[in-house]
Image (spheres, helix red, strand yellow):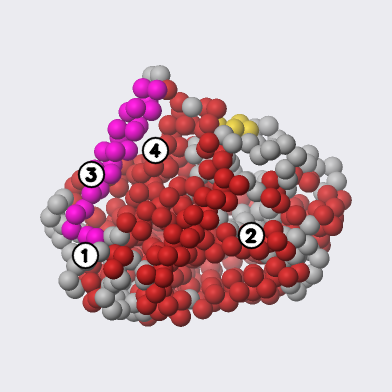
Amino acid sequence: MSPHLAAAIFYIGIAGLFYLDRDKTVHTSKALWLPVIYLWITGSRSVSGWLGIAPPPGVNTQLEGSPVDRLFFQVLLAAGVLVLIRRRSRTSALLKTCWPILLYFSYCLISVLWSPYPDVAFKRWTKAIGDLVMVLVVVTEADLTAALRRFLSRTGFILLPLSVLLIKYFNDLGRGYGPSGEAMNTGVTTNKNTLGVITFILTLGAVWQVLTLLGAKGQPNRGRHLLAQGTLLAFGVAVLAMAHSATSVACFALGTVLMVATRVPMIRGRASAVHALILTIMIAGAFMMLFGGEGAAVHALGRQSNFTGRTEIWKAVIPAVPNELIGAGFESFWITPSCMDKVADNLAGWWNPRGLNEAHDGYIEVYLNLGWVGVGLIALIIISGYMRAVAAFRRDPGISSLLLAYIATAAIYSITEAGFRLLTPIWIFLLLALVGAGRIASGAIGGAPEAIDGPVHPDADVLANNNYALHLLPSND
């Protein structure tokens, strides 16, 4: 099949997925397209990368970035802020419930002061605020369940089929080579690990929607929604296999097990049972470590016993941190010359030690940039988010199972990848899970939606605080 014919078939198929998954009985605002577009780019490759715009000669892209990409994010950030201003009552209510996130971002801003390039660090912090703004746009929708469902579907229907198309028929765009010259499938992204993380996140969303539809047997048009989400799930599993990202495969499996287990009657809606489930998983992991099973587990996932060179990187970068307590400054470690000199010395003999730009561990990455203070704040975010997600089970077990899966997989994914960095899908969905769980657990949002949302269900004020009830509303389209 010629690439152009394949592209035409895929485009028709993508349009068909959107058509099958339509639902006129639930309402989301047009503003929801802002985070969808945002994730299309952060989950694939930069705007300048898609357009093939190379930086001018002599420009240090690591410090200065791309003007095209900067303009893109500035426009989306400004539009998102305007939406949140129009929704200020709901926004302020949510911000009160996610104070650990605000504390973390505030500390990141303060850390700009000791960065060797404060102007660069401040620009990166502004970009990082965009992640939170887009999350708030999703979570401040009147119907959180419908908003999350459409956010996941609109993103997945584009990125996952296009990844298969590029890998199979456009090798110059969908495939590449790793640092040591090995071939890898990259799909819509530029790296197999990046492809793996956006795929496992979106595929977890498809699993959640399929499980939800399977449990809603009396819902009209259930068949075509199942067909759309089942197709998306199939694409996701196929892309995960193509990406060969062991961490993403393991996280997808864990997230799926968590969502299925929390739907068992003896666990569903019971916080104590959820705690027991998580504790069981932790004990199993501890026994594996105590009795030397970690080597077998690593090899089973396709990794070497040194996590494919990660342990050498960890040993090299940790001693290079300029200040153990406060780090090098927000997103500044990898642009600090003295830090990179120490890393290069510690990795003498490597193929390209100065080509590193991450520690391949989210917790170490935070330590390098923000020190022990930053690590403590990340721990606070994860623990408080987990507690909120468990508490949310009392109000809405269905959607909370997905939020818990995102929190758990983000914590585990960050053991071997830099999962807490700005503009990364796993960080965006961790924030989404934390803020969403806070909304459900506390019933933070009430009152009539602002004008920007347009007409809504007449009982939206009540249903916004009980998304499980919204989830059970029938569809008549």
Whichever of callouts 2 and 3 sits on the residue coming sooner in the sequence is: 3
Q: Nearer the viewer, mark 1 or mark 4?
A: 1
| Residue occupied by mark 1 | 455
Where disc 2 sits, the SS reads helix
Q: How many marks?
A: 4
Q: CA distance from mark 4 to mark 3?
A: 15 Å
Q: Which residue type carries mark 1?
A: Pro
Q: Sequence order check: which comes first, mark 1 or mark 4?
A: 4
Left of 144 or right of it: where is 34?
right
Which amino acid is tagged 2? Lys
Q: Is residue 45 left or right of residue 337?
A: left
User: In the rendered image of this protein, does residue 384 appear above or below residue 28?
Assistant: below
Q: Main secondary structure of the magenta part?
A: helix
Per the image, the residue denoted by label 3 is 20
Looking at the image, is mark 1 or mark 3 earlier in the sequence?
3
**Mark 3 and mark 1 in contact (Cβ < 8 Å)?**
no
Observer able to see residue 248: no
Q: CA distance from mark 1 to mark 3?
A: 24 Å
Residue underneath mark 4: 161
Q: Which residues are magenta?
A: 4-27
Amino acid under label 4?
Answer: Pro
Residue 123: mark in rendering: 2
